[in-house]
Amino acid sequence: MSNYLPGHPDILVTTAFDLPEHRTVKVLGIVRGITVRTRGIGPQFIAGLTTIVGGRVGVYVSMCEFARQEALEFMLTHAREMGANAIIGMRYDATELGQGKTEVLAYGTAAVVEPIRS
């Protein structure tokens, strides 16, 4: 099982609070990545139509996925700057900041880990 994210072979990321077969050498602190996204008029119009007929709102799904990926990238950059090779207990959070504006936060604990040798 690999906890490396595609395109990021240098940092292990897990939502668990430990990494199997690894020892935490040093905890570096909290890392985070924040982005704020807004809905444009096009997606709002399409979502309005979807609300009338029902169903999945694909434009919002895409927007949310992009925001999560962007927040994740910022968090990984922050972890690298601290010298981490792992992020433990990674989570996402989102907050509506106002009409049409949403903050997406990716956060976790930056750490230096090493494989346990048997």
Image: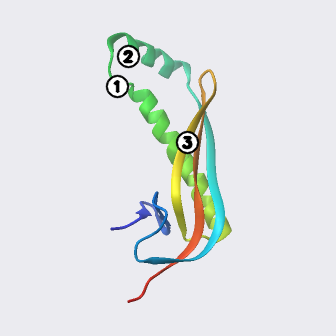
Q: Earlier in the sequence, mark 2 or mark 1?
A: 2
Q: Earlier in the sequence, mark 2 or mark 3?
A: 2
Q: Residues within 10 Å of mark 1 (few under 14, many from 20)?
A: few
Residue 81: % across, % down: 67, 66
Q: CA distance from mark 2 to mark 3?
A: 26 Å
Q: Quadrant of the C terminus?
A: bottom left
Q: Which residue is mark 2?
A: 50
Q: Position of residue 80 (x, y in %)?
A: 62, 66
Amino acid type for the residue under numbered disc 3: Asp
The residue wearing badge 3 is 93
Task: Choose top left, top right, bottom left or bottom right for residue 5.
Answer: bottom left
The amino acid type, in three-letter code, at marker 1 is Arg
What residue would you read off at disc 1? 56
Mark 1 or 3: the one toward you: 3
Q: Residue furthest top?
A: 52
Q: Marks 1 and 2: in contact by CB < 8 Å?
A: yes
